[in-house]
Image: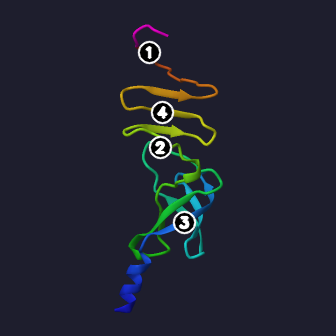
Amino acid sequence: MLDELYSTIRGIPSLGLVQAVDDSGPAQLLTVMTGDGVWRDKVEVMQIFGFASVPPGQGAICLLLALGADPANLRALPVACPAARAGQLSAGDSVIYAQDGTRIHVKTGGDIEIWAKTAAINAPSGLTIEGNGQV
């Protein structure tokens, strides 16, 4: 009975402090230090489809799950970096952002703000921009 309890407790989520990110392969892999001071290597991040990012080197954290209560089968949920987070959004807003302030801010109500040093659009089949004619 104690073995079953121990196995169940091992599957409880834990917090990981990201030490390194390997984004070179088909899955993003992390080196993390768990809340109890254990280092884990090659922890796969369960990425959200259609979005990819690499967190800045300092202060990134993730939620770790031991699938099947097996610590050898550890997965990380998408990585957060609270210190570099784009904040002060209104309800319903979404933003894609980089650490240097570059961002695409989709606002509730239909406005989109793009902050960039340069911008490139690759549209081999053509580009259509519609509006009311005002610049």
Q: CA distance from mark 3 to mark 4?
A: 29 Å
* Label 4 with label 2: CB-CB less than 8 Å: no
Please tell me which residue lies in front, 113 or 41.
113
Q: CA distance from mark 2 to mark 1?
A: 24 Å
From the viewer's perspective, is the residue at label 3 or at label 4 nearer? 4
Q: CA distance from mark 3 to mark 2?
A: 21 Å
User: Mark 1 = which residue?
Assistant: 129
Q: Amino acid at mark 4?
A: His
Q: Amino acid at mark 1?
A: Ile
Q: Position of residue 112 (x, y in %)?
A: 45, 27
The answer to which of marks 4 and 2 sits earlier in the sequence is 2
* Label 2 with label 1: CB-CB less than 8 Å: no
User: Mark 3 = which residue?
Assistant: 16
Categorize mark 2 by other alpha carbons within 10 Å: few (<14), some (14-19), many (20+).
Answer: few
Query: Which residue of the protein is positioned furthest toward the bottom in this rendering?
Result: 1
From the viewer's perspective, is the residue at label 1 or at label 3 nearer? 3
Instruction: Name the residue at 40% across, 82% down.
Output: 7
Q: Is residue 133 magenta?
A: yes
Query: Which residues make up the magenta segment?
Result: 131-135
Q: Amino acid at mark 3?
A: Gly
Secondary structure predominantly adopted by residues drawn in magenta? loop
Instruction: Name the residue at 57% across, 29% down.
Output: 115
Residue 51 bears which disc, if any? 2
Q: Secondary structure at mark 3?
A: strand
Residue 105 bears which disc, if any? 4
Q: Position of residue 116 (x, y in %)?
A: 60, 29
Q: Position of residue 45 (x, y in %)?
A: 50, 57
Query: Which residue of the protein is positioned furthest toward the left in this rendering?
Result: 1
